[in-house]
Image (cartoon, rainbow, N blue to C red):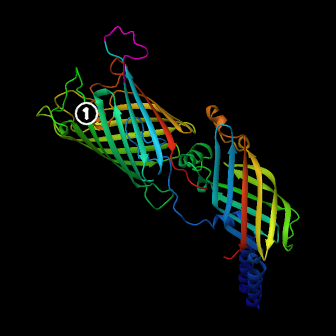
Amino acid sequence: MNKIIILILLLITITGFDTTSDQFMTRQGQVSFFSYTSVENIEAKNNQVLSIIDFAKGEIAVSMLMNAFVFKKSLMHEHFNESYIESDLYPKATFEGKIIDFEPLATGVQTKMVKGNLTIHGITKEVEIKTTIENTNGTYRLIGDFEATVKDFDIKIPPVLAPNIAKTISIQFRFEYQPYEK
Amino acid sequence: MKNKTRFLTYLFIYLGFGMSIYAQSLLDKLDKEYPETPQYEIATFKSTRIGIGHSIENRKKGVLQVVAMNRYWNIPNRPSQSFVADKWSARIALEYGISDRLTFGVGGTTLDGIFDGFLKYRLLHQQKGSGGSPISLTLFQNASYKSKRNRPFVDVNVFDDFTDKMAYTSQILIARKFTPQFSLQLSPTFIHRASSAFDEDPHNHFAVGFGARYKIGGHISIASEYYYVVNPLKSIETYDAFSLGVNWEMSDLMLQFMMTNTRGMVEDAFILQTPNNFNLNDGNFIFGFNATFVLHLSQKKL
C-alpha cells in the first residue's frame, strides 16, 4: 500500500515538476555595448550569453561572463576586466525578471516590457526594458536595447580618463531561443 | 508502526526533493550551463616591464609598443646648476607582438651606446581555479651591443672586435597572480659576456630577479624589483639592482615612475654593472621614468 503511494508520489514528482517543456534557452546570445565620446569610441561584443525563459511563469534570466566580451583593441579587453569591471571579483553580469503580459502562444512580433533586476559589478538595479519578441515556428527571438549609467554600478573612472568613457553606455541584445533540453 | 515511520520519511524526502526543484531559480539553472572552458588570469602585471626588468606579460598580436625609458641622476660633489638633474640617459624601444605569445623588440640606449634586441615567448598561462598551470612562464632572450666606452668608469669588456662588445641574457620569467591585487615574479637569469678585459671576471653569470606588484587602485599599482647576482664581476665593485616605484596605467599609455640605483636599462648592464648601492646620495639615487605607448596596428573585427 505504502509502496504504491510512494510510486504515485514519485510519478507526480517526475511529471508534475518536469517543467522543461515550458522552458526555452540560448547559449549563444549576443550582447554588445557602446560608449561614444568625442575622444574615443568603445565597442564590445559577447557571443556566449546564456539565457532562459520559463513560459509558464513568464520569467526570464540572463547570465554572461564579463571576460567573454571581445573588443577591437586587445588592451581594452584587459583594462575593461582589470581596471573597470573587476571581473576577478565580479565575473558575471546577470539579469532576472519577468516579461509583463507575455503571450507565449501568439505568433509573430509582440513588443513587451521586461522588468527585473540587472546585476553588474556586484550591484543590482531594477530596470525596465522594452523588448521585441518574435515567435517563428516554436523558436523565440528577443531583441532590444537599453541604456545603463556607469555611475549606477559603482564603476570607477579616474578623472583623467573621464572624457574617454561615456556617462551612459548603450547596450544591445539579441537572443534566439530553442526548446530547453537537459 | 515501522511502516508508518518509513512512509513519513519518504514523504519528507519527497517534499524536500520537490521543494528543492521548485526553489531552483532560472539563474541557478544558467550557472550550470556554462561550458567548462579554462579561464586564464590576465594582467599579472599591467606592463611588459615591472620596473627595470621584463615582466611575464606580452602584448597581443599586431600590437606595437613605443617605449621611452629615462633615467635621471646627479653627479656627486658638483655645484650643479643643471635643471632637474645633471645626467640623463634614455632608451627608446619598439616592441611588436608577432603572435599572442611572441614579442620581438629592439632598443637603443644613449648611455654607453647600447643597442639591444630581444625575443620574448609566453609559454604558460596561469589558469583560474583548480587545474591547469598555477603559474605563468615566459622565456626571454636578448642580445646587446655596447658601442661606446664608459669613461671614466673601467670597462669590463674588450672593444676590439664587434663580437667582443656583445652580451647575451637568457631569462625564465615565472610569475603568479596570488590575489587580484598581488603578483609575484621570480626570474632566474643567465648572462654571457662575449669578452672580458680582466682575467678574474667570469664570462658567465647567474642571477635571480625578484619582482612584485601590489594594486592600490584600478589603475595604480606599486611595483618593486630586485636582482641578486650569484657570481658578480670581480674587477670592479658592483651592487645588486633595485627599484621601487609606481605604475600608472591610463588607457593606451603606461607610466612608470621609480627610484632605483641603476642607470642601465638593458639586462646585462643593470644586473651586472650597477656601480653603486641604493641610497639618496647624489650619483647613487636615480629617478626612473618609463612611458609606454600602445598602438593597435591590427584590430579585431566584432
Residue A114 lies left or right of residue B253; in this view the side is: right
User: The magenta stretch spans which residues?
Assistant: B77-88
Q: Is residue A12 above or below residue B210?
A: below
Residue B83 in the image, given as x and y percentages of width and height: 43, 14
The residue carrying mark 1 is: B146
Going by the image, does B215 lie left or right of B200?
right
The disc labelled 1 sits on which kind of residue?
A: Lys
Most frequent secondary structure within the magenta stretch:
loop
Relative to A22, residue B196 above or below: above
Is B127 or B301 nearer to us in this picture? Answer: B301
In the image, B6 versus B249, the foreground residue is B249
Q: Is residue B296 visible?
A: yes
Q: Is residue B150 above or below residue A117?
A: above
Q: Is residue B46 left or right of residue B232?
A: right
Q: Is residue B44 visible?
A: no
Q: Does the segment drawn in magenta span residue B250?
A: no
Q: Secondary structure at mark 1?
A: strand
Q: Nearer the viewer, residue B2 or B69?
A: B69
